[in-house]
Amino acid sequence: MSLVKRLTQLNLSVMASSMLLVFSLTSILLWFVVRDRQAETAETNLAQLAHNVVPMLVFNDVETASKELELVGVNKDVLFISLRDTKGEVFSEYAKPSFVKSSALYQQVGIESVREYEGVRMRLYYPVSIKGKFEGDLIMVLDLTGMMYWYLQLVLMLALLIAALFTGSAFLLSRVQRQALMPLISLSELAQRVSHEHNFQLRANVIRDDEIGILTRSFNELLKRVDISQAELRQQLEQEQAQGQQLKQMVRTDPLTKLPNRVALNQLLKEITCEACNPKPLSCLMFIDLDNFKFVNDNYGHDAGDETLIEVGKRISAIIRSDDLLCRLGGDEFALLLPSIESTENAEKLAARIVTIINQPIVVKETVMPIGISIGLAYTPLDADAPMELLNCADDAMYAAKRAGKNNFQVFSKQAPV
């Protein structure tokens, strides 16, 4: 249930309780006012009747007294009228008291007016006197049913009026509360949107400078701080990722030639020789070693040796495919992995081209470096199925090229002498 509905229900409950209490108290008060007003009117009529019948009571004129009582008794609300003398004996009366016992009706004659209520009937006792001398009393019983019907109609009309006012007030209250709480509703919707979209750049509009306005400003300030923290965190993560990428690249890269190193080679070897690869593609590993490289370092310096290694890497990289992997293993040793070839002839043609381009003069500091190249070729899955076995096979083939006079390539053969 929304806050607007909850507050509306609470307010309507309080308003309904208040209206019901006011209605009940008003109805009770109205009943007593109407009843007392009826009694006052009846007592006025009795006072006039007492003034009229006192001579008849004095001169013992029963017939005229009965006519006077009958004139008052024609009122539909009058059930009974009785005129008594000072001894309490009935002098004249209108109708018979069949609705109540005589003993309860004819009480002791009093010199003061008395008003009694019994259900929907009212009994009045009024003294009859002349020049201060008490001569008897009048008893009148009234039926309040008609007055009660009129009272109930009045109460019903009042109830309908209050119900109409309550309905209208409830509608207006709902509209007013929704309008008053609209900033809070908007703030709640914004919070849900921020939670769903994770967009901390959203802001709420400050509509009024009240408590909700203060809450809105505080919420906007919180979003601002979270947005700044998120931006700083993203920047930090990007820097750490960049550093991690650089570190990862450094771990996999030879710092001199910028070629991949043994770590990168081992990873790719594991991929092409994995047991899950079925069928395994034909791949070739070339183990490359420079001839006379120690002579270059000893006679021309390590700087010249480094320049020579860089140039060798550039020349080989220029003639291989983008999927092929040329690595520097360390010193003057390189490895070239061809992950997928159509035939062994293609790999051997590439090895011959490598020998040819390396035999072209490599000039460092205006001096031709007297180096050659020996290459050993091994194939997977023909020669080996495991990374180290394949590397050993290629290494054996490279030494076979050294024994064959250097500056050439040899293919691994299991029958070749070790």
Image: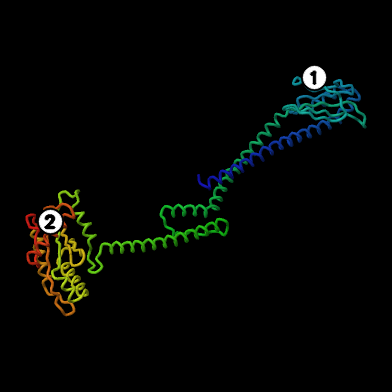
- Residue drawn where x is 50% and y is 57% of the image: 219
Q: Nearer the viewer, residue 78 or 189?
A: 189
Give the answer, above or below, for where 298 lies relative to 245. below
Nearest the camera: 149 or 62?
149
Horizontally, residue 142 falls left or right of residue 342, namely right
Amino acid identity at mark 2: Tyr
* Looking at the image, residue 243 lies above or below residue 109: below
Which residue position holds label 1?
A: 102
Residue depicted at x 42% and y 52%: 196
Residue 197, how many percent across, how many down? 41, 54
Dot 2 surroundings within 10 Å: few (below 14), some, or many (20 or more)?
Answer: many
Q: Position of residue 379 (x, y in %)?
A: 12, 56
- In the rendered image, the quadrant that contains the C terminus is bottom left
Q: Residue at x 23, y 63 (%)?
A: 261
Residue 39 picture quarter: top right
Q: Please state if 105 lies on the left or on the right of 326 as rendered.
A: right
Q: Give the mark nearer the N terminus: 1 vs 2.
A: 1
The label on residue 393 is none
Secondary element at tag 1: helix
Judging depth in this view, the residue of 346 and 357 nearest the camera is 357
Residue tagged by mark 2?
A: 379
Amino acid type at mark 1? Ser
Identify the element where label 2 is drawn.
Answer: strand
Determine crowd level at label 1: few under 14, some 14-19, many 20+ residues with C-alpha closer than 10 A: few
Towards the viewer: 293 or 108? 293
Write down the quadrant of residue 291 in the picture. Answer: bottom left
